[in-house]
Amino acid sequence: MEWLTSLAPVLTPLFGMISVLGGGWMMYRQNQRKNDTDAATAEATTFVTSVQTVTSGFTALLEQQRETNAKTLERVTTLENRVERLEEEQRQWRRWKAAAVDYIHQLRALLAGIYERPAPAPPREIAEDLADGPGA
C-alpha cells in the first residue's frame, strides 16, 4: 500500500488529466449528438415544409381546375339553352312558312277561279317555294 501512496504525486495529475480528457470527450459527444439531432430536425422540418408546399400547390391547381370546369359547364349550359331557343324559333318559322305557302296556294287557286286569266307570277324571292304547289 505504501507503494501506492508513493505514486500519488504521479497518479493524481494523471487521473486529473484523464478526467479532463474524459469530460472533454463527453462534452464533444454531447455537442455532436445535439448537432446531429438539430440537423435531423432541420431536415425533417425542411421535408415537412416541402410536402406542405407541394400539397398547397396541388390544392391550388385543383381549385383552379374546378373553377375552370364550372365556368365551362356554365358556358355549355348557356350555349345549349341558346341552341334550343334558336331551334324552336326555326321550327316556328318553318311552320309559319308552310302555312304562308299553303295560304298563297289557296289564294292563287281562288283567284284563278274568279278571274279568267292566270294568277300573276310570284316574286323571285318566293317563286321557288311556290313552284311545287297546286297553283303553279
Image: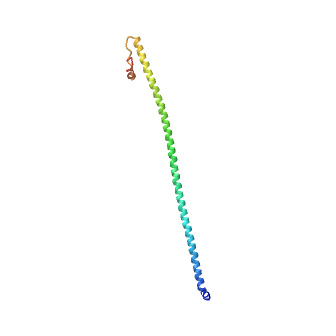
**Image location (x, y in percent) of residue 19:** 59, 78
- Relative placement, left or right, of 129 versus 23 is left
**Image location (x, y in percent) of residue 25:** 56, 74
Q: Residue at x 56, y 70 (%)?
A: 31
How many marks overall?
0
Q: Please, is residue 108 above or below residue 54 in the view?
A: above
Figure quadrant of the N terminus: bottom right
Q: Residue most toward the front?
A: 1
Q: Nearer the viewer, residue 122 or 44?
A: 44
Q: Nearer the viewer, residue 53 or 123?
A: 53
Q: Residue at x 54, y 58 (%)?
A: 48
Q: Please, is residue 30 above or below residue 77 in the view?
A: below
**Image location (x, y in percent) of residue 126:** 40, 22
Figure quadrant of the C terminus: top left
Q: Please, is residue 99 above or below residue 22 in the view?
A: above
**Which image quadrant is residue 133 in?**
top left
Q: Nearer the viewer, residue 42 or 29?
A: 29
- Relative placement, left or right, of 56 versus 126 is right
Q: How is the image coloured?
A: rainbow
Q: Residue at x 52, y 56 (%)?
A: 51
Q: Please, is residue 93 above or below residue 32 in the view?
A: above
Q: Residue at x 51, y 44 (%)?
A: 67
Q: Nearer the viewer, residue 107 or 21?
A: 21
**Image location (x, y in percent) of residue 129:** 39, 22
